[in-house]
Amino acid sequence: MTSIDPVDFVRAYFDKIRRLLDSTDLQALARLMAVLETAWVEGRQVFIIGNGGSASTASHWACDLNKGASHPGRRRLRVISLTDNMAHFSAIANDCGYDKVFTEQLRNLVQRGDVLIGISASGNSPNLLDAFDYASRQGAATVAIVGFTGGKLATMADHVVHVQSSEYGPVEDMHLMFDHVVTDWFRMVVMPRTEAETDADGA
């Protein structure tokens, strides 16, 4: 039997999350929210990408921003997670290499003014870096939601939200909390505005 008290272990983990919450750059989150609001006002497409646990987080963000952020009588955010079409994903990986699984999807879809969000703990995944390079050259805005040191992705992105932790679990916890904050902001604040207010904000 372990000599570590499970309650103490849980408390220590929660304390780590509290410290990360306290150290979060709220202005960086606000800038992300502004980027997404502009995309909504202008009818742009938002793409989200990630690997492993961050692929699941990308799907979660897409679900919440499409469904959870909706409001009766208002047009929706247009969000696609490029981690979800496994047939297309695996065909690209097989034929072109794993580094191209997101870039080749973007070739079919991305347009100038769209938004690409990359979610990554390390910020160094080659397939995200390749996708950011391509999207930037097509005139899309790029947002890196990262952990650890931020990696190369943070240096390539137009906007960065950085969780300063070297542990995967806490970084991924924070990335999901960011999703829920942004979703609540759209559902509770942005969507209920009158169209005149929204037009004035986007002018």
Image (cartoon, rainbow, N blue to C red):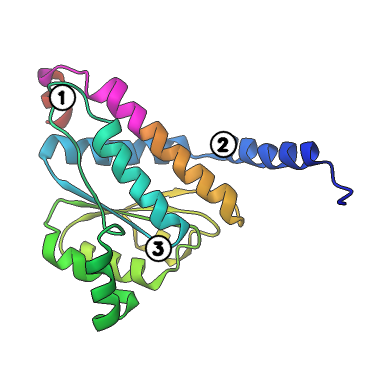
Residue named by callout 3: 153
Main SS, magenta residues:
helix
Residue drawn at 15 percent across, 24 percent down: 198
118 or 69, nearer to the observer: 69
Q: Quadrant of the C terminus?
A: top left
Q: Amino acid at mark 1?
A: Thr
Task: Work out whether residue 164 can be spotted.
Answer: no
Q: Position of residue 146 (x, y in %)?
A: 46, 54
Q: CA distance from mark 2 to mark 1?
A: 30 Å
Q: Amino acid at mark 3?
A: Leu
**Mark number for residue 41?**
none
49 or 68, nearer to the observer: 68
Q: Position of residue 84 (x, y in %)?
A: 29, 57
Q: Amino acid at mark 2?
A: Leu
Q: In this view, which residue lies farthest toward the front?
A: 1
Quarter of the image for residue 135 reads bottom left
Q: Residues within 10 Å of mark 2 (few under 14, many from 20)?
A: some
**Mark number for residue 21?**
2
Q: Earlier in the sequence, mark 2 or mark 1?
A: 2
Element class at badge 1: helix
Asked whether 194 falls inside the magenta stretch, the response is yes
Q: Earlier in the sequence, mark 3 or mark 2?
A: 2
Q: What are the residue bounds of the magenta stretch?
A: 183-196
Q: Mark 2 near mark 1, Cβ–Cβ under 8 Å?
A: no
Residue named by callout 1: 198
